[in-house]
Image (cartoon, coloured by chain):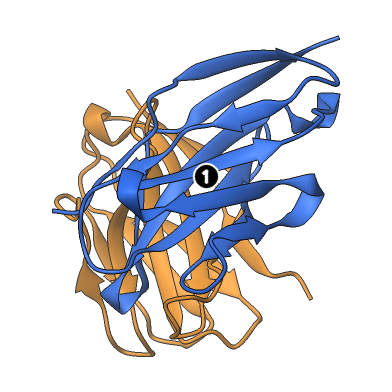
């Protein structure tokens, strides 16, 4: 039982390049989330999904797109990377109960030059 | 908009001493509150959560937190800190749709 995994762990991009971050979970969770973590700001929600084929915007969605074609996977895309997107990105998943725990992946450190 | 404030950015504590991390949340209906811990280079792990009932909540690793509605606070405590408790701690508020609002975090350093 791997929990929540993220690929890749590290990445360096040049401004304007594109990339996709992959999140996978093996706990059969309905809900999945993408966050970014910046110093002093905690984690902020980028996009989330309440089920296969659905996505919704979070607090800071601009410059990102997501897709949830399979229940176990949640993809985060950057179409044209900007230095402001340098951050650590975390994926999480949970059951659809507010009091339930969100399980987090180990994170992806992205640097945009 | 709901917000969560952690007034202390850094706290340094000696090993074996007690620890208290402060958290205040903005006014609203009965809040769903969590404390998560992030060890260096790691993801986040849930320490404890509160959504109703007893206002003193016990968590993992010897941590507890007390919900005080009158003070809009949910402070985290541990009676005796271990070197392995050095980490960043986040107070988090839950809202409809399972969306979480994070505080800015408190980084705890443990002196030998």
Q: Quadrant of residue A4?
A: bottom right
Specify the chain shown as orange. A
Residue that carries the numbered disc 1 in the rendered image: A108
| Residue B31 point in image, percent of width and height | 34, 64
Q: Is residue B97 left or right of residue A90?
A: left
| Residue A17 seen in render | yes
Q: Is residue A56 above or below residue A46?
A: below
Q: In the image, what residue occupies the spot 33% across and 33% down?
A: A41
Q: How many labels, in total?
A: 1
Q: In the image, what residue occupies the spot 83% across and 24% down?
A: B83
| Residue B51 point in image, percent of width and height | 46, 70
Q: Label 1: few (<14), some or many (≥20) within 10 Å?
A: many
SS at mark 1 in the image:
strand
Taking depth in this image into account, of A103 and B57 the one nearest to the observer is B57
Q: In the image, what residue occupies the spot 57% across and 16% down?
A: B11
Q: Quadrant of residue A29?
A: bottom right
Q: Is residue A104 left or right of residue B4?
A: right
| Residue B85 point in image, percent of width and height | 75, 32
Q: Is residue B7 above or below residue B38?
A: above
* Quarter of the image with the C terminus of chain B in it: top right
| Residue B48 point in image, percent of width and height | 62, 58
Q: Is residue B50 above or below residue B88?
A: below
Q: In the image, what residue occupies the spot 28% across and 56% down?
A: A46
Specify the chain shown as blue. B
């Amino acid at each position: 039982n791997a929990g929540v995994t993220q690929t890749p762990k590290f990445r360096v991009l040049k401004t304007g390049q594109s990339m996709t971050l992959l999140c996978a979970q093996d706990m059969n969770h309905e809900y999945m989330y993408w966050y970014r973590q910046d110093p002093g700001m905690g984690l902020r929600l980028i996009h989330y999904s309440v089920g296969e084929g659905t996505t919704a915007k979070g607090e800071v969605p601009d410059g990102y797109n997501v897709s949830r074609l399979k229940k176990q996977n949640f993809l985060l895309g950057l179409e044209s990377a900007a230095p402001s997107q340098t951050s650590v990105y975390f994926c999480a998943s949970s059951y659809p109960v507010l009091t339930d725990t969100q399980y987090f992946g180990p994170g992806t450190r992205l640097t945009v030059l | 908009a709901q917000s969560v404030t952690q007034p202390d950015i850094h706290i340094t504590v000696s090993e074996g001493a007690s620890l208290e991390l402060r958290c205040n949340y903005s006014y609203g209906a009965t809040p769903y509150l969590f404390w998560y811990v992030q060890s260096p280079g790691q993801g986040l792990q849930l320490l404890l959560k509160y959504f109703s009932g007893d206002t003193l909540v016990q968590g993992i690793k010897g941590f507890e937190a007390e919900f005080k509605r009158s003070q809009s606070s949910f402070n985290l405590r541990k009676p005796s800190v271990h070197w392995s408790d050095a980490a960043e701690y986040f107070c988090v508020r839950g809202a409809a749709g399972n969306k979480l609002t994070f505080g800015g975090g408190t980084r705890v350093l443990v002196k030998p």
